[in-house]
Amino acid sequence: MEAVRDGVFRGLALYLLWWVLTEGDSSGLTAGLVITVAITLISLGLFPASRYRIRPVAAVGFTVHFLLRSVAGGTDVAHRLLKPRLDIKPGYRTFYTTLPKNGPRWLLANTLSLTPGTISANLKGDCLELHCLDITAVTEDDFRDTEARVAAMFSQRSRHEVEQ
C-alpha cells in the first residue's frame, strides 16, 4: 500500500512539474501524462518507496539552512581567492554520522558536497570523509548541526541528540 501511495505522490509531483515546465500549455498534457507515468514507474524501480517521510516544515528549515551555508561558503571561497596570498589549508576531515542508511546519509553527504569549499570524498558505513579547502573551516559542530537538520527532516533523531 505504501508503494502505491508513494507512486501516486511521485506521479502527481512529476505531472505538476511537467505542467509548470510547459507553462500550462494544454497541448502537451496528454504527452506529459504518458511520460510522467513512465518516469514514475522507472523511479519506483530505481528508488523504491522509503520508510522515511519528509516533514515539510523541517524541509523548509533545512532548505534555508542549506542556502545560507552555501552563500556563506561561497563568500568565504571568493574572499580566499581574491587575497594576494591564497589562504587555504586543504585536507581531509572524517566524521561519523548517526543517520540511518540510504536516503538520510546520502542527503547529508551530498549537502556537504554542495557547500562551497567541501566535497564528500568517501561514505562507507557511518564514516563520511570530506575534502576541505580549509580543514579548520568545517567543525564538528557545523557537521552535527547539518546532520540534525537532515534527521529532523526525515523525522529521525541523531544519536548525538538522544545522548544529550
Image: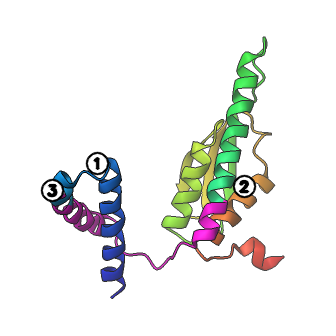
Q: Quadrant of residue 58?
A: bottom right
Residue identifier under label 1: 22
Measure the C-alpha gap from mark 3 to mark 1. Answer: 11 Å
Judge depth for marks 3 and 2 and give the one in front: 3
Instruction: Tell me if 155 is positioned left or right of 137 in this view.
Output: left
Looking at the rendered structure, the kind of residue marked 3 is Ala
Residue located 16% across and 62% down the image: 34
Residue 124 visible (yes or no): no
Dot 2 lies on which element?
Answer: helix
Viewer-closest of 27 and 5: 27
> Label 2 crowding class (10 Å Cα cut-off): few <14, some 14-19, many 20+?
some
Q: Secondary structure at mark 3?
A: helix
Q: Which residue is mark 2?
A: 143
Q: Is residue 110 above or below residue 33?
A: above
Image coords of residue 51 (percent x, y): 46, 80
Task: Give the CA separation, mark 2 to mark 1.
Answer: 39 Å
Kind of element beneath mark 1 = loop
At a point 84% along the width and 76% down the height, the residue shown is: 164
Q: Is residue 48 magenta?
A: yes
Q: Quadrant of the N terminus?
A: bottom left
Q: Which residues are magenta?
A: 33-61
**Comparing labels 3 and 1, the label whose residue is closer to the camera:** 1
Q: Which residue is mark 3?
A: 31
Q: In the rendered structure, does residue 36 fall within the stretch colored magenta?
A: yes
